[in-house]
Image (cartoon, rainbow, N blue to C red):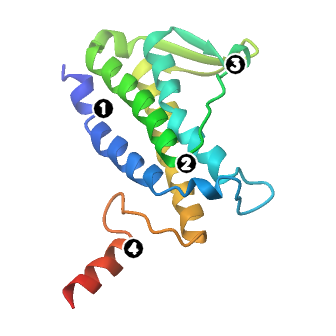
Amino acid sequence: MPDLRETLFLDLDHEFDATRKILAAVPWDRADWKPHDKSMSLGKLSTHIATLPQFGMAAVTTDSLDVSQVQMPEVEIGSTDDLLGVWDQASGALRSALSEAANEYLEAPWTMSVNGHPMFENSRHTAVRQWALSHIAHHRGQLTVYLRLLDVPFPGVYGPSADDRAKMATQRI
């Protein structure tokens, strides 16, 4: 059987590096800004992304999680550097935990519930992909829309962004 860490998490470094680059573009002086009344603020969305690896850690380090029983610690962020520090700690811990996990352990069942009612039952590795990695990618895309609306340049994730292309065009002249 192939090593799950090498197949399922092959893109982990790329995804984590790309997320860090996008978080580095966040102008923390605009943390209260939101594109719509129903939207999260820029600061809340960025903080959410920076802490999402903790969900992956829960899947790697526990057999189950009842999210209604968990009180996430408040994270004090006052700058983009603080945001990157939170990301580096959380993503580094998940990267390390995954590097040490054996196939059998990653294939073991894991459950997420709300008030004792299961909302997700699958393998640990599926929980990490869905509730941490895919969740991060989803919100990272949302964050790039926020940055575009604020006219903040940001790097591409899966190829050059419009900002990267504009920079390349000016460098050719």
User: In whole angstroms, how far apart are the C-alphas of marks 1 and 3?
Assistant: 29 Å
**Left or right: 5 in relation to 133:** left
Q: Earlier in the sequence, mark 1 or mark 2?
A: 1
- At mark 1, the secondary structure is loop
Mark 1 and mark 3 in contact? Answer it, CB < 8 Å.
no
Res. 8 mark: 1
User: In whole angstroms, how far apart are the C-alphas of marks 2 and 4?
Assistant: 20 Å
Residue occupying the far right of the picture? 37
User: In whole angstroms, how far apart are the C-alphas of marks 1 and 4?
Assistant: 31 Å
Residue occupying the far bottom of the picture? 173
Residue type, mark 2 in image:
His
Label 3 sits on residue: 71
- At mark 2, the secondary structure is helix
Q: Is residue 150 visible?
A: yes
**Left or right: 22 in relation to 138:** left
Res. 139 mark: 2
Q: Nearer the viewer, mark 2 or mark 3?
A: 3
Give the x, y percent position of residue 148.
Answer: 54, 69
Which class describes the residues within 10 Å of circle 3: few (<14), some (14-19), or many (20+)? few
Q: Residue at x 65, y 53 (%)?
A: 31
Q: Nearer the viewer, mark 1 or mark 4?
A: 4
Residue type, mark 3 in image:
Gln
Res. 163 mark: 4
- At mark 4, the secondary structure is helix
When asked about the image quadrant of residue 12, the answer is: top left
Nearer to me, 49 or 159: 49
User: In whole angstroms, how far apart are the C-alphas of marks 2 and 3?
Assistant: 21 Å
Give the x, y percent position of residue 52.
Answer: 52, 33
Q: Nearer the viewer, mark 2 or mark 4?
A: 4
